Image (cartoon, rainbow, N blue to C red):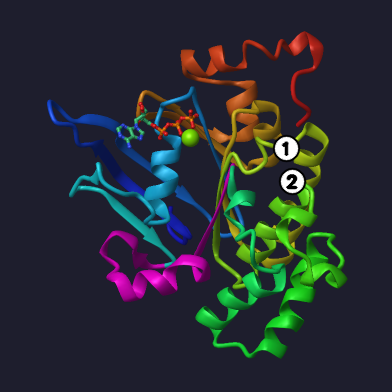
Amino acid sequence: MSGALLSVKNLTIDYIGEEKDFRAVDNVSFDVAPGEVFGLAGESGCGKSTIAFAISRLHKPPALIRKESRIVLAGRDVLDLDQQALRNFRWREVAMVFQSAMNSLNPVLRVETQFYDVLRAHKGMTKAQARERTAEMLKLVDISPDRMRDYPHQFSGGMRQRIVIAICMALGPKLVVMDEPTTALDVVVQREILQRINELRKQFGFSVLFITHDLGLMVQFCDRIGIMLAGKLVEQDSAEAIYKTPQHDYTRKLWAPFPSLHGGPQL
Ligand SMILES: Nc1ncnc2c1ncn2[C@@H]1O[C@H](COP(=O)(O)OP(=O)(O)OP(=O)(O)O)[C@@H](O)[C@H]1O
Ligand SMILES: [Mg+2]
């Protein structure tokens, strides 16, 4: 696809073992358009998180990305970035929200300080500028700016996750990678957060790579979905086509718990 924001080509990732290597991601290719939500679905262990980490360049040994792999984001070769370029790339180009992200807040620092650290490091903002931006971002996720001097433990899990999302959005990334961003939260809070992210996406135009085990949520939230099986991307199509006219046996099996007689997920 020309004009893609993210282009993943022949991505192959092994976990290097003492005896033998394990191919976790096997020749995976997909594109994500600007403003698009692309979902990755598939059973536990099929390689979704391994892809998410590679795209954010957060993978660590023993994960090894094979030479033929290409990841291009906003015209830049992600796998080629040096350490300096990488610091700018993270947050500014790509932000990652994962399941336990809410626990990544530093418990001994006020929320405003955590925003300030990011905004100072990446945008060179002064305290006053950062405070203004923090208020703006907290409002976007429905948290009162009055609370920016509170500590993480003073917020509920859902609020902490929203704070992390707000920090991620503060630098205006082009791509947000969300790996089970709401799995640790109850269902109502999950939907509220995803709705908020969707509104922010419409407002700011970033793309989302979305990973969840909740297939109903996935179909609702994604424009297109890729189905993974044992490291391979076996099918990718619009959410509607993947749900209504799946081509691959495995995709049909994934939908089995959603008998269409009962309506299935609402499109
Ligand atoms: N550090 C590691 N060392 C060795 N193997 C690993 C490592 N991390 C993951 N794997 C293996 O790579 C495969 C893909 O793992 P990954 O975490 O990407 O799957 P996933 O699709 O995200 O699963 P889940 O839905 O459970 O989160 C799995 O078989 C896993 O056991
Ligand atoms: Mg995972």
> In percent of the image, x 72 and y 53: which residue is there?
160
Q: Amino acid at mark 2?
A: Gly
Magenta-span inclusion, residue 74: no
Nearest the viewer among 135 and 207 is 135
Q: Earlier in the sequence, mark 2 or mark 1?
A: 2
Q: Is residue 203 left or right of residue 76?
A: right
Q: Is residue 81 left or right of residue 158?
A: left
Nearest the viewer among 112 and 46 is 112
State the residue position of label 1: 185
Q: Is residue 67 left or right of residue 127?
A: left
Q: Is residue 73 visible?
A: yes
Nearest the viewer among 189 and 23 is 189
Q: Secondary structure at mark 2?
A: helix
Residue 26 percent location from the top left of the image? 29, 33
> In percent of the image, x 67 and y 32: which residue is there?
219
Magenta-highlighted residues: 75-99
Q: Is residue 37 visible?
A: no
Name the residue furthest left. 19
Residue 30 percent location from the top left of the image? 42, 44
- Within 10 Å of disc 1 (Cα), the crowding (few <14, some 14-19, many 20+) is some
Would the CB of label 2 be found within 8 Å of ligand 2? no
State the residue position of label 2: 157
